[in-house]
Amino acid sequence: MNNIMDNFSKSSCCGCGGCAQICPKKAITMFEDEYGFVYPRVDSNLCINCGLCTKACPFKTSEKGKYLSSYLYIEKDEKKRSQSQSGGAFNALAEKIIGLGGYVFGVEIDKDKNIFHSFSNDLNGIEKYKKSKYVQSDLRNTFKECADLLIDKKLVLFVGTGCQVQGLINFLDLKNIDSTNLYTCDLICHGVPSQKLWKDFSKFLEKKYKSKIKHIIFRDKSTSGWHGHVDKYEFENGKTLVGRYWTNIFNSNAYRDSCFNCKFTSVYRCSDFTIGDAWGLEKVYPNLDDNKGASLILVHSSKGLEFIKDICDKEIDINDFSQPRLCGDNNLKRDERFLEMYKNNPDKAFKHYLFPNKFILKIKHSIKKIIK
Ligand SMILES: Cc1cc2nc3c(=O)[nH]c(=O)nc-3n(C[C@H](O)[C@H](O)[C@H](O)COP(=O)(O)OP(=O)(O)OC[C@H]3O[C@@H](n4cnc5c(N)ncnc54)[C@H](O)[C@@H]3O)c2cc1C
Ligand code: SF4
Ligand code: SF4
Ligand code: SF4
């Protein structure tokens, strides 16, 4: 049987590390390429060709998944909604799980700006998962931790991107873990830049503004609302920066190759739920759009439907809320020069894409005018 490196292609690897977590011989290690994207590497001296890594891979899964129905969710508690990225769907699911004595897996950011999955079983503990961190999260050992909790008959909610959740489902299947107590929730996902790129970028800002960043909100609703896409940085020297900084960098120029070949872009998924922003609300229900955030919840299993029946009451037609990553759109554009420039000189790339030289822009503008 083959191992994961046979016919390997970067565009079919989301870097979930599921192959490394499943390998019985610890033959797989994850390494960072020159852009900071993580990929597996197999030690052929240890590999016994059992094929488990290939079976664990979310990009090799042929199951299409199901789609049952969709709901609009707008959290009534204004404080909770303001703390959430969209309309508070994650909080509603997580609070119910915690209330039932369960455990929630989500993504946090630490003081060194590492972005990673962890789990918690109390309401204070899930606060750190709120707000989207638009960077690839490091799953660390969470597939194994989730399996251990399920073996212990604990109730679990696991939230991640579509590829991460599919990786978890495959891992648990291969380990023959009873998943009756597991609820999986993936996100509508446009793509992810690497942790290295994110950390280099935050160092660039710290140098430019001569102070350490103590708090970051990747998409800040408090300044220009849910529709405004701005990021916010609070520095140790008391300064605050708000604007399209990371927002402009993390666009498709910086996504990993697999995000241009994503398999998790339709309404059909193997998770129980998919959550995301209810973009288009202003057209469908203008009276409900107060620019403070609204969520979509897509349900893919009867177990999921049963779970949310006391959470959601407003069923919607998903066609009214269509967006690229729900209708199979992989047609993202990438300016290849960005990653090339970043590889050679990160600061130069950030400066060029964020603060283009005004003099050169002026000349380009005049040349265009003359050509016209
Ligand atoms: C990389 C990324 C791309 C996204 N792209 C889209 C999109 O194209 N369209 C769209 O409608 N929505 C997208 N979303 C989802 C959206 O930003 C919100 O996360 C989602 O609507 C949940 O909002 P909430 O109010 O329910 O949750 P909140 O209470 O804000 O909770 C956020 C949830 O997201 C999880 N999370 C945070 N960062 C990450 C991460 N890096 N990786 C995995 N999970 C994470 C947390 O664990 C938590 O469960 C994306 C999210 C991420 C992280
Ligand atoms: S084939 Fe088996 S032993 Fe070899 S790398 Fe894959 S999981 Fe590990
Ligand atoms: S997608 Fe995940 S399981 Fe598949 S090769 Fe990449 S890291 Fe391994
Ligand atoms: S776009 Fe697809 S491959 Fe990329 S992180 Fe999101 S779900 Fe994974």
Image: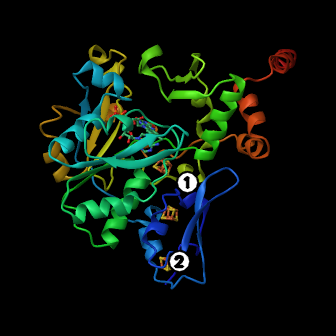
Tell me which residue sits at (87%, 15%) in the image. 370
**Which label lies toward us, 1 or 2?**
2
Q: Position of residue 185 (x, y in %)?
A: 31, 47
User: Residue 296's image quarter?
Assistant: top left
Depth check, front residue: 123 or 4: 123
- Which structural element holds mark 1? helix
Q: Amino acid at mark 2?
A: Asn
212 shown above or below 156: above
Residue 317 seen by the camera: no
Tell me which residue sits at (60%, 77%) in the image. 43
* Neighbourhood count class around disc 1 (C-alpha, 10 Å): few under 14, some 14–19, many 20 upward: many
- Which structural element holds mark 2? loop
> From the Cβ of disc 2, is ligand 2 less than 8 Å away?
yes
212 shown above or below 331: above
Residue 3 image label: 2
Q: Position of residue 27 (x, y in %)?
A: 54, 76
Q: Are marks 1 and 2 in contact (CB under 8 Å)?
A: no
Depth check, front residue: 209 or 15: 209
Residue 193 seen by the camera: yes
> From the Cβ of disc 1, is ligand 4 less than 8 Å away?
yes
178 shown above or below 46: above
Tell me which residue sits at (29%, 64%) in the image. 148
Q: Amino acid at mark 1?
A: Ser
Q: Position of residue 31 (x, y in %)?
A: 61, 61
Q: Position of residue 41 (x, y in %)?
A: 60, 69
Pointer 1 residue: 258
Q: In the figure, is residue 335 to the left or right of 313?
A: right
